[in-house]
Image: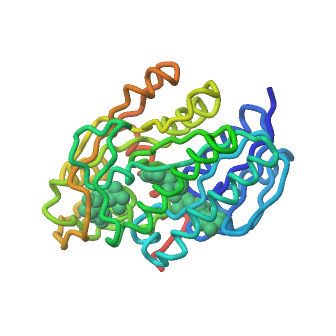
Amino acid sequence: MKKRVLITGGAGFIGSHLCERLLKEGNEVICLDNYFTGSKDNVVHLLDNPYFELIRHDVTHPYFIEVDEIYNLACPASPVHYQYNSIKTIKTSVMGAINMLGLAKRIKARILQASTSEVYGDPLIHPQPESYWGNVNPIGIRSCYDEGKRCAESLFVNYNEQNNVDTKIIRIFNTYGPRMNPEDGRVVSNFIMQALLGEEITIFGNGEQTRSFQYVDDLVEGMIRMMKSGKEFAGPVNIGNPNEFSMLELAQKVIELTNSKSKLIFQPLPADDPTQRQPDISLAKKELDNWEPNVQLKEGLSKTIEYFDQLLKNGWTRK
Ligand code: NAD
Ligand code: UDP
């Protein structure tokens, strides 16, 4: 059935893929974004579609509209960007959640929160199941993001219990793909751009820290299945690819796939950088109709490299 769907942060990397997919499935999509880290360029190809609306709005202010579903994605996601104005990051997570939950309550819409594996902090349990409470430094440089997202989860749970709002929480693990901001400082975009430009590849620390990288199409499938799941399952549920790599292994793969001559350079590890991260996805498999990721690193990286290569061919240069 055709739905009217609001996506906050819809002009960002993940949001733009979600807009595209929901439109393709015949829904009406309203994309709300303040373009802090996202861009009109990410959704410009959708503007001809009469069922797509693009609105400049900051989610720290209330917004009123009639929709059936809300995906709440507005929030900078890369450490460089979320630390740029840490107080604003907290406001976006917390006030954004309050404003969108208030809207969902008023119009009786179902609402999904894009939470994060960062709620597990530097995890002491490996891989991380949803039942793990995490190991987060509440006053560290990542806390504006981690604690903002943890508070948003608490708001979602409490609006559900106290006000009967139909909420869903997914915890997204490191996701990559076309339309990542080439300068947002995340490791996949950094390494690919550096490799394509023949620059040194910046490894933070000794490069032995690990992440589990998920291609964006697998995430979008998981998000949509979560939104469609029964009311009794509110989550949180991990959505990620359990294949885990060290940053050194990632750099090696990127160099191979780009045929780059770039050399590795080692730089200091930022404070509180998690040592390891891998999702336990058994709950997602059980509750979301056997959902699991299909795109493995080599295939996903190749598609992402193709995107960044095209950006460069179209004249993109560093600011
Ligand atoms: P992104 O930075 O590309 O997208 C975030 C979008 O939110 C941008 O378009 C930005 O302009 C918008 N935004 C930021 N502050 C806003 C505000 N106050 N009002 C309105 N819009 C605002 O990042 P992304 O990777 O697409 O992440 C999307 C969501 O998924 C975020 O909530 C992020 O925390 C979550 N997430 C992403 C990952 C990942 O690996 N990409 C992992 C875990 C969680
Ligand atoms: N990283 C790196 N070089 C870079 C950017 C990041 O070695 O140029 C490392 C970073 O220290 C972290 C990992 O890559 O250990 C993932 O970083 P990202 O910012 O992509 O995601 P997050 O740390 O939020 O999972």
Q: Is residue 179 visible?
A: no
Residue drawn where x is 85% and y is 48% of the image: 66
Q: Locate residue 112: give its quadrant.
A: top right
| Residue farthest front in this picture | 162
Q: Where is residue 215 in the image (x, y as percent from the top left)?
A: 44, 41
Residue positioned 51% across, 50% down in the render: 153
- Foreground of the two, 147 or 189: 147
Asked if residue 182 lies left or right of residue 233, the reply is left
208 horizontally vs 117: left or right: left
- Near-viewer residue (1 or 256): 1
Seen in the picture, residue 152 relative to 144 is either above or below; the reply is above
Q: Nearer the viewer, residue 164 or 100?
A: 164
How is colour applied across the structure in the image?
rainbow
Q: Is residue 289 above or below residue 293?
A: above
Q: Is residue 189 visible?
A: yes
Rendered residue at 64%/47% (across/down): 159
Q: Position of residue 219 (x, y in %)?
A: 50, 39
Give coordinates of residue 172: x percent, y percent: 45, 45
Please state the horizontal and vertical placement of residue 275, each as a whole percent of the image. 20, 54
In the displayed structure image, the side of residue 165 where residue 291 appears, left or right: left
**Which quadrant holds the N terminus?**
top right
Quadrant hosting ligand 2: bottom left
Numbered-mark total = 0
Q: Which residue occupies 73% across, 54% down?
A: 102
Q: Which of 57 and 264 is in front in this view?
A: 57
